[in-house]
Image: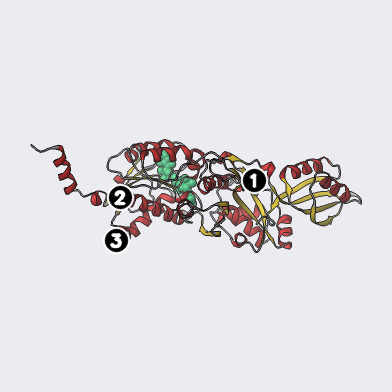
C-alpha cells in the first residue's frame, strides 16, 4: 500500500522544485503607458532573461478597463480581460504586476493577490505612500514579495540600494529631485529666462506636464515619493499626509534671476531627514519630511540635474554621499524598473524565498515650524526713504538676521530681496506675518529656503 510519504516522494521526483516555476506567468493589472512599455520590453528581453536566470517570464493575462483598445503590444486578444479576478485569483498566474495606479481598487486587488500567495510588483506610489504599511504587512504575513522599484524615481535603481545595499548604513538624509515635470519647468526658467506660465505651457506641449498639472507643480507627487523614501531609508511608517509640501507655481523670473546672480539654482526638493541622537535602539526616530523649492549652490551635485531628469542624494555616516541619477518617469524607464523586480520575484518564487522590507516602526514627524535653514525672501514695497529700516526692524525683532540684501526700484515701487542667516521657520513665518501688516509692504512675493550652510 503506497504511503502518503512515498506519494510525496514520487511527486518531488517528478517535479523537482527547481523546475516548478521554470515558466513564470505574469498577470498585469493595467496596460497603459507603463504596462504597454513593460510588455514590449519583456518580449524583447525574454530569451536573454531565460538564459541568465533559467526562468522564462511570460505575460499570461492583462486586466484593463477597455479590453478592445489597441495598445501596440504583441499579445493575443484573449489575454486581455476586464475581469480583474482572473489576474489576482487565477491559479495559472504566478506573479501580479500592478501598473494601474490609484489607491482603490489597486489596494484591494493587491491584498487579494497576496492572500492568494502571489508576489506583487507595483509602480504605484500613491498606494504605497498612503497604505504602504498595510500592504507591506500583508505581504510579509503571507511570505510573498512586494517589490516597488518603479514607484520612486521611475527607472532609477534606488529602492533596492536603500533597502538592501544600505540596510546597515546610518542614513541621516535623503534629498532628491523626484519630479521631472517641475525640474523641466525650473530648468527652462533658469536657462531660457522664461516665466513660469511659459515654461509650463512648453512642458505640456512636450508631454512632460499633464493638462491638469496640479499633482506635479504643487508638490503632491514628490510628497508621495518623499514618504516612501523616508519609510525605506529610516525603516519607519511615514505617509503622504506627513509630508509638508509647497510647489513651484509662485516662483517668479525675478527669484530665478536673483539665484543666478548669487551662484544658486532653484530646484524642487524632496527632503527626508532623521534628527541626530535619536537613532538609538528603542527610541522613536524623529523624521522631517518636506517638499519645497530650494536654492542650492551651483556646485552641489543636484544643481547639475537638468530638464526632466531625476536624482536622489543620499547622505550616510559610513558611506558618505551617494547620488542616483537618471530618468524618473516615462513608459520605458519605468518598465525597466518593473522588469528588474519581476525577474527578482520570479527567481525568488522558484527558490521559495522572498524579499522583506523589514519592520516599519513608529516615527515622530518633526513639525515644519522647527526647521532651521536660511531663507530667500522677496518683498514688493513702496519706494520711499525709511522703508528699508522699518522692514529690517521687523526681521530683527523676530530673531531673523539678514545676510544679504538687494534693492531694485521700479517707479513708485521697489523690490527688496533678502537672504537671511539660518533661522527657525517659526520665526520667519512670524516675520512674514508682521511684514504683511506693514503699510509700506505691498506684498510678500516669494519665500524660498536656501540650503547652503547645512549641506
Ligand atoms: N507613467 C509614468 O511615467 C510612471 C512613472 C512611474 C510610476 N508610474 C506609476 O505606474 C502606474 C501606471 O501609470 P501609467 O502612466 O501607465 O497609467 P495609465 O497610462 O493611465 O494606465 C493605467 C492602466 O490601468 C488600467 N486601469 C485603470 N483602472 C483600472 C481598473 N479599475 N480595472 C482594470 N484596469 C484599470 C487602464 O485601463 P485602460 O487602458 O483600459 O483605460 C490602463 O491600462 C501608476 O501607479 C503610476 O503612478 C508611472
Residue with the mark numbered 2: 351
How many numbered marks appear?
A: 3
Pointers 3 and 2 in contact (CB under 8 A)?
A: no
- Direction from residue 411 to residue 330 in the image, left or right: left
Residue at the image position 14 percent from the left and 41 percent from the top: 6
In depth, the one of 389 and 238 nearer the eye is 238
Q: x%, y% of residue 381?
A: 83, 49
Q: Give neighbour class at mark 1: few <14, some 14-19, many 20+ (Cα, 10 Å).
A: many
Q: x%, y% of residue 300?
A: 63, 61
Q: CA distance from mark 2 to mark 1?
A: 45 Å
What secondary structure is marked by label 1?
A: loop
In depth, the one of 89 and 19 nearer the eye is 19
Q: Give neighbour class at mark 2: few <14, some 14-19, many 20+ (Cα, 10 Å).
A: some
Instruction: From the image, state whether disc 2 or disc 1 is nearer to you.
Output: 2
Image position of 48 with respect to 21: above or below: below
- Pick the quarter of the image with the N terminus: top left
Q: CA distance from mark 3 to mark 1?
A: 48 Å
In depth, the one of 100 and 450 nearer the eye is 450
Pointers 2 and 1 in contact (CB under 8 A)?
A: no
Among the two numbered marks 2 and 1 on one chain, the one whose residue lies closer to the N terminus: 1
Instruction: From the image, state whether disc 3 or disc 1 is nearer to you.
Output: 3
Instruction: From the image, state whether disc 3 or disc 2 is nearer to you.
Output: 2
Residue at the image position 69 percent from the left and 57 percent from the top: 452
Residue at the image position 79 percent from the left and 43 percent from the top: 431
What secondary structure is marked by label 3?
A: helix
Q: x%, y% of residue 75?
A: 32, 51
In depth, the one of 378 and 10 nearer the eye is 10
Residue at the image position 34 percent from the left and 50 percent from the top: 348
Residue with the mark numbered 1: 246
Using the image, tell me which numbered label, if any, was put on residue 51. 3
Among the two numbered marks 3 and 2 on one chain, the one whose residue lies closer to the N terminus: 3
Q: Quadrant of residue 68?
A: top left
Amino acid at each position: 500500500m503506497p504511503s502518503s510519504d512515498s506519494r510525496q516522494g514520487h511527486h518531488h521526483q517528478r517535479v523537482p522544485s527547481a523546475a516548478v516555476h521554470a515558466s513564470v506567468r505574469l498577470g498585469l493589472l493595467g496596460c497603459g503607458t507603463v504596462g504597454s512599455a513593460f510588455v514590449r520590453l519583456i518580449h524583447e528581453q525574454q530569451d536573454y532573461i531565460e538564459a541568465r536566470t533559467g526562468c522564462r517570464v511570460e505575460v499570461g493575462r492583462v486586466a484593463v478597463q477597455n479590453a478592445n483598445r489597441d495598445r501596440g503590444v504583441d499579445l493575443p486578444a484573449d489575454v486581455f480581460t476586464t475581469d480583474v479576478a482572473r489576474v489576482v485569483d487565477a491559479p495559472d498566474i504566478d506573479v501580479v504586476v500592478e501598473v494601474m495606479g490609484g489607491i482603490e481598487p489597486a489596494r484591494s486587488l493587491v491584498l487579494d493577490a497576496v492572500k492568494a500567495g502571489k508576489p506583487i510588483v507595483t509602480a504605484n506610489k500613491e498606494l504605497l505612500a498612503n497604505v504602504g504599511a498595510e500592504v507591506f504587512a500583508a505581504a510579509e504575513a503571507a511570505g510573498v514579495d512586494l517589490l516597488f522599484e518603479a514607484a520612486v524615481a521611475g527607472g532609477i535603481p534606488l529602492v533596492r540600494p536603500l533597502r538592501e545595499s544600505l540596510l546597515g548604513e546610518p542614513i541621516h538624509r535623503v534629498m532628491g529631485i523626484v519630479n521631472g515635470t517641475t525640474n523641466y519647468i525650473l530648468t527652462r526658467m533658469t536657462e531660457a529666462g522664461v516665466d513660469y506660465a511659459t515654461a509650463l505651457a512648453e512642458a505640456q506641449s512636450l508631454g512632460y506636464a499633464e493638462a491638469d498639472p496640479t499633482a506635479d507643480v504643487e508638490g503632491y507627487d514628490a510628497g508621495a515619493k518623499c514618504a516612501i523614501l523616508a519609510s525605506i531609508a529610516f525603516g519607519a511608517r511615514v505617509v503622504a499626509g506627513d509630508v509638508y509640501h509647497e510647489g513651484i507655481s509662485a516662483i517668479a523670473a525675478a527669484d530665478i534671476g536673483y539665484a543666478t546672480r548669487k551662484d544658486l539654482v532653484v530646484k524642487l526638493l524632496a527632503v527626508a531627514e532623521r534628527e541626530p541622537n535619536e537613532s538609538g535602539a528603542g527610541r522613536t526616530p524623529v523624521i522631517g519630511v518636506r517638499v519645497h523649492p530650494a536654492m542650492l549652490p551651483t556646485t552641489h551635485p543636484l544643481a547639475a540635474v537638468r530638464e526632466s531628469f531625476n536624482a536622489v542624494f543620499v547622505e550616510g555616516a559610513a558611506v558618505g554621499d551617494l547620488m542616483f541619477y537618471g530618468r524618473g518617469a516615462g513608459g520605458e524607464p519605468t518598465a525597466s524598473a518593473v522588469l528588474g523586480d519581476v525577474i527578482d520575484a520570479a527567481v525568488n518564487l522558484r527558490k521559495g524565498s522572498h524579499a522583506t522590507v523589514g519592520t516599519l516602526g513608529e516615527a515622530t514627524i518633526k513639525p515644519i515650524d522647527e526647521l532651521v535653514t536660511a531663507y530667500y525672501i522677496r518683498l514688493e514695497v513702496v519706494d520711499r526713504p525709511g522703508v528699508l529700516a522699518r522692514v529690517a526692524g521687523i526681521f530683527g525683532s523676530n530673531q531673523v538676521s539678514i545676510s544679504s540684501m538687494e534693492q531694485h526700484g521700479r517707479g513708485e515701487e521697489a523690490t527688496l530681496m533678502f537672504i537671511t542667516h539660518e533661522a527657525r521657520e517659526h520665526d520667519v513665518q512670524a516675520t512674514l506675518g508682521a511684514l504683511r501688516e506693514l503699510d509700506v509692504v505691498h506684498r510678500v512675493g516669494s519665500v524660498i529656503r536656501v540650503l547652503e550652510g547645512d549641506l
